[in-house]
Image (spheres, rainbow, N blue to C red):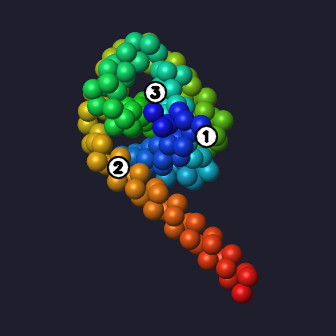
Amino acid sequence: ESLFGQGLPELAVMNYAFEKSIQKFCPKLFSHLRSVDMKTEYFTFKWSMTLFACSLPICLLVHVFDLFVLEGWPAIYKIGVSLLNNFLSDKLLPLDGMMEIHNICVKTFADLRHILGGHTSVIIGSHHVNINKSDLIKLKEEFYINLAQEKIKEHAADYQDLG
């Protein structure tokens, strides 16, 4: 519920957790996206805010929402990783432009309703991704530790400038 509070306080944490999950479970794709200066936030922002409602066909959303009710937020990360591994990775790796990557993502999500067994592949694929609530808690802690360290560095630099 804090995700949708004023200023979207948890969104940065969620994007960080998605980024680390993609880095861990889709390392080739993650490296490729970095090489073309594309951050994973480009698509994970929408996924987090809408629970995939803006991206996936309704036949798949029903299953995504079921998993979300059963597992909570880990299900959303698992679905995202599954989508990348099962439908997007091979299509995105040859591309070198953000607009091309965006267009393929949109087309692939729209095509999922027509791909035989597409929605079951996403759901089954998500069960092979090992992300649980304690993993998300650790990533959240890591995010805030990194944020605190950045603030300390900024303040240390400010103090050096004064001296």
Q: Residue at x 47, y 43 (%)?
A: 14
**Please, what secondary structure does the residue beneath circle 2 have?**
helix
Q: Please state which amino acid type lies under the numbered disc 2.
A: Ile
Q: Earlier in the sequence, mark 3 or mark 1?
A: 1
What mark, if any, has residue 66 been given in the picture?
none
Q: Position of residue 93 (x, y in %)?
A: 50, 42
The residue at the far right in this view is 162
Q: Which residue is mark 1?
A: 7
Q: Which residue is mark 3?
A: 51
Q: Please state which amino acid type lies under the numbered disc 1.
A: Gly
Q: Residue at x 40, y 12 (%)?
A: 59
CA gap, disc 2 to disc 3? 19 Å
Q: Please state which amino acid type lies under the numbered disc 3.
A: Leu
Q: Which residue is mark 2?
A: 137
| 2 or 3: mark nearer the eye | 2
Q: Position of residue 62 (x, y in %)?
A: 37, 15
Looking at the image, which is closer to me, 136 or 25? 136
Q: Is residue 150 left or right of residue 85?
A: right
| 2 or 1: mark nearer the eye | 1
Q: Earlier in the sequence, mark 2 or mark 1?
A: 1
Q: Position of residue 32 (x, y in %)?
A: 52, 49
| 3 or 1: mark nearer the eye | 1
Q: Quadrant of the N terminus?
A: top left
Q: Position of residue 107 (x, y in %)?
A: 55, 23
Q: Earlier in the sequence, mark 2 or mark 3?
A: 3
